[in-house]
Amino acid sequence: MAQVRSKDKITAGASANGAAHPASTQPDGFSWSEVARSAPAQVAIAAMALLGLGISIYLTVVHYDTKVTLVCTSGSLVNCGNVTTSAWSVVPGTPIPVTIPGMLWFVVSGGLALVGLWRLRMGRTEPASLRLTQFVWGLGGLLFVIYLIYCEIVLVHNICEWCTAVHILTFLTFILAFYRLQHSGEAPDMAVAQAAIAQAPSARQARQMALSRRARRVANNGGVSSGRNGRRG
């Protein structure tokens, strides 16, 4: 009778553990490689923000430090020197070069992408307003780029290779932000992975369940052995 009670207690405890833990399991997060595969657009936006920030910093240094040489073609159409030293190379009404707002734009753009990536890394969904915010921010950058292109072609009659690279990065960022906004209603692959993690027991819970099964086997074997010994007696 004592063995039967002990067996019932072990079984009840295992059932309680098995029923309680999976329901309260929280996602354990994902590796960066999994995040990159699940959100390639965000990774691309972050990478382009880093590249654009580097170019903007370089052009800002060239603007303020005359000792730094501007590496660029100097031809009839492509002439970075004429563009970066023209009256339209600064924010209208200020002595601030347009590269500084460009730096800030890329910092914010990359920061927004990293917010989404970090949320996925922690096993959480991205903020509901993130896609719209990225789209609006990308649209603002695109409008400023259109103004700069107008200044280069119509007013200065030259284009700058470095500026063109920044313009392309801004345009691609806008396209990706627009694409993400258009597909905001679709469930991303990460959501499926989150559901799988939420339903699966953690490593500690798996060990507890394994110990419970082992205890049940020991109790069952003990019961069988006792029954055999009783028959022999």
Image (tube, grey):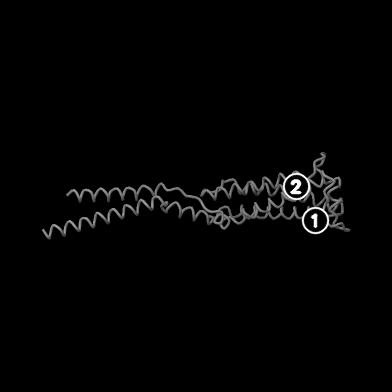
Write the residue at 56% across / 56% down. Answer: 33
Q: Which residue is mark 2?
A: 57
Write the residue at 77% across / 46% down. Answer: 99
In percent of width and height, residue 36 lies at 58, 56
- Numbered circles on residues, count: 2
Three-letter amino acid code of the residue under disc 2: Ile
Q: Residues within 10 Å of mark 1 (few under 14, many from 20)?
A: some
Measured in 3D between alpha carbons, the distance from the residue under mark 2 to the one under mark 1, in whole angstroms, is 15 Å
In percent of width and height, residue 157 lies at 87, 54
Q: Which residue is mark 1?
A: 161
Q: Residues within 10 Å of mark 2 (few under 14, many from 20)?
A: some
- Quarter of image, res 226: bottom left
Image-based side of 42 in relation to 51, left or right: left
Write the residue at 42% across / 54% down. Answer: 200
- Quarter of the rendering occupied by the C terminus: bottom left
Image-based side of 173 in relation to 64, left or right: left
- Quarter of image, res 222: bottom left
As helix, strand or loop, the secondary structure at mark 2 comes to helix
Image-based side of 210 in relation to 82, left or right: left
Which residue ends up furthest to the left in the rendered image? 233
Three-letter amino acid code of the residue under disc 1: Glu
> N-terminal of the two: label 2 or label 1?
2
- Quarter of image, res 216: bottom left
Which one is nearer the viewer's eye here, 78 or 129? 78
